Image: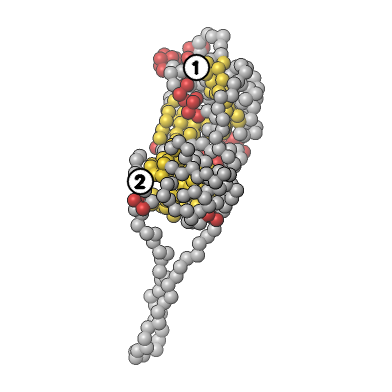
């Protein structure tokens, strides 16, 4: 096995159009690429203890018991074997692996988290040593032609301990410890094995990692919690994650699009907010949000990207709200992601803010197509604001 480690009016700008969704007919051009998976519950492991040896008898010097005898401590749990990358052990993150299932072991045919899927082809096993609690994300970045490698996260090196699996991705929020990853070959109903070369990325994401991007701590904590909950509910099987902090001024780059499995910051962008969300004279600050049609307000909470379409503002992206009472009406309100002249750096520099919208999360036209193509079709977007009502009632937090 060959294994490598890598690593955006003017005192009020007069305009008859606002950055927001339109009612153009969307044309579906993407498909969600993952199946529903199940999650197993880890079990506690017993601790091993070493018996205390009884000393050989000797002469009695003082029959009075020692008032403060030294306690005899049990032996600690055995330490895991050294983590050697060449032997398939991973303890540095993010890590990229280039390998092949050809010639791998054939010890695992089905897994408890998807027992009806034939994984009887050869597999490669990796031991993962997590030094800290975090979200363990695994993604198949590429495969050879006629290769189909599925990934499975295991509590132990045992198919019965499968925690999560996927055709391309697997993940779970885990405590520090030893876990296992199986990259296994899918076999079709005719018995054809799709073994071959593949590239994996493995990463452990913590709140500290998100905060290091420039996201304020509370927003980072809530973003991590929301993503973990959504993953457990099978709301997504994607690791591209867009986090927006609406408490920041719109002239600042307040959206981060992060790839959980590779640890890459893909984009850091300005984002527009609705004119109805503004209270006061600073058009760059939003402070009220709603799920109400015709309010021209932005919505907070977790949404999921959907299909793309070409509308009044060009190539745009539909989104679906996942949180009733907070953003479940975004599709009906035509709240979308679209390019907007008001996000152009020269406009932001001149005006001092992103030109407000009718509620849409607008982005810079110079990168909008690339951004939309990156997150379309099932990725999560989290719109955060330190609102006590939302934070107290969201089922994702």
Q: Nearer the viewer, residue 238 or 339?
A: 238
- The image position of residue 329, as x and y in percent, is 64, 27
For label 2, the SS is: loop
Question: In the drawing, what numbered circle is on residue 340?
Answer: 1
Circle 2 or circle 1, nearest the eye: 2
Relative to 322, say whether 159 is above or below: below
- The image position of residue 341, as x and y in percent, is 47, 14
Left or right: where does residue 360 sit relative to residue 147?
A: right
State the CA–CA distance, disc 2 to disc 1: 44 Å
Dots 2 and 1: beta carbons under 8 Å? Answer: no
Q: Which residue is labeled 2 in the image?
A: 3
Left or right: where does residue 394 sit relative to residue 259?
A: right
Residue at 42% across / 28% down in the picture?
A: 268
Q: Quadrant of the C terminus?
A: top right
- The image position of residue 120, as x and y in percent, is 52, 50
Residue at 34% across / 51% down in the picture?
A: 86
- The image position of residue 281, as x and y in percent, is 51, 18
- Residue 30 figure quarter: top right
**Which class describes the residues within 10 Å of circle 1: few (<14), some (14-19), or many (20+)?**
many
For label 1, the SS is: loop
Relative to 1, say whether 348 is above or below: above
Question: Which of the marked residues, 2 or 1, is nearer the chain's N terminus?
Answer: 2
Q: Does the rendering let one see residue 201?
A: no
Residue at 60% across / 48% down in the picture?
A: 116
Q: Nearer the viewer, residue 126 or 364?
A: 126
Residue at 38% across / 51% down in the picture?
A: 88
**Which class describes the residues within 10 Å of circle 2: few (<14), some (14-19), or many (20+)?**
some
Q: Nearer the viewer, residue 4 or 352?
A: 4
The scheme the figure's colours follow is secondary structure
Instruction: Count every numbered label the image shows and give the total.
Output: 2
Q: Does the rendering let one see residue 46?
A: yes
């Amino acid at each position: 096995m060959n294994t490598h480690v890598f690593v955006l009016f003017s005192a009020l700008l007069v305009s008859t159009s606002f950055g927001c969704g339109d009612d153009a007919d969307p044309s579906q051009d993407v498909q969600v690429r993952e199946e529903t998976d199940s999650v197993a519950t880890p079990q506690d492991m017993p601790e091993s203890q070493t018996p205390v040896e009884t000393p050989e008898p000797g002469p009695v010097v003082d029959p009075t018991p020692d008032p403060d005898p030294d306690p005899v401590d049990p032996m600690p749990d055995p330490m895991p074997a050294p983590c050697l990358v060449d032997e398939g052990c991973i303890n540095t993150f993010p890590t990229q692996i280039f390998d092949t299932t050809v010639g791998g072991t054939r010890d695992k045919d089905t897994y408890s988290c998807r027992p009806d899927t034939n994984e009887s082809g050869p597999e490669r096993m990796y031991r993962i040593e997590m030094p800290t609690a975090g979200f363990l994300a695994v993604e198949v970045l590429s495969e050879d032609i006629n290769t189909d490698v599925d990934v499975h996260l295991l509590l132990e090196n045992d198919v019965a301990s499968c925690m999560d699996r996927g055709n391309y991705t697997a993940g779970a929020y885990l405590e520090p410890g030893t876990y296992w990853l199986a990259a296994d070959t899918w076999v079709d109903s005719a018995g054809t094995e799709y073994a071959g070369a593949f590239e994996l990325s493995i990463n452990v994401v913590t709140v500290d990692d998100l905060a290091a991007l420039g996201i304020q701590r509370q927003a980072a904590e809530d973003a991590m919690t929301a993503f973990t909950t959504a993953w457990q509910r099978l709301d997504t099987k994607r690791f591209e994650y867009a986090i927006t902090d609406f408490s920041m001024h719109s002239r600042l780059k307040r959206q981060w699009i992060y790839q959980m499995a590779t640890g890459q910051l893909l984009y850091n962008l300005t984002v527009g907010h609705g004119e109805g969300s503004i209270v006061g004279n600073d058009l760059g600050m939003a402070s009220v949000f709603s799920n109400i049609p015709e309010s021209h307000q932005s919505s907070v909470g977790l949404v999921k990207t959907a299909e793309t379409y070409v509308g009044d503002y060009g190539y745009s992206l539909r989104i679906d709200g996942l949180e009733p009472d907070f953003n479940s009406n975004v599709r009906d309100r035509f709240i979308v992601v679209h390019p907007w002249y008001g996000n152009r750096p020269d406009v932001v520099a001149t005006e001092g803010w992103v030109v407000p919208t009718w509620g849409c999360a607008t982005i810079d036209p110079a990168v909008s197509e690339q951004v939309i193509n990156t997150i379309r079709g099932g990725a999560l977007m989290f719109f955060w604001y330190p609102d006590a009502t939302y934070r107290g009632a969201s089922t994702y937090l």
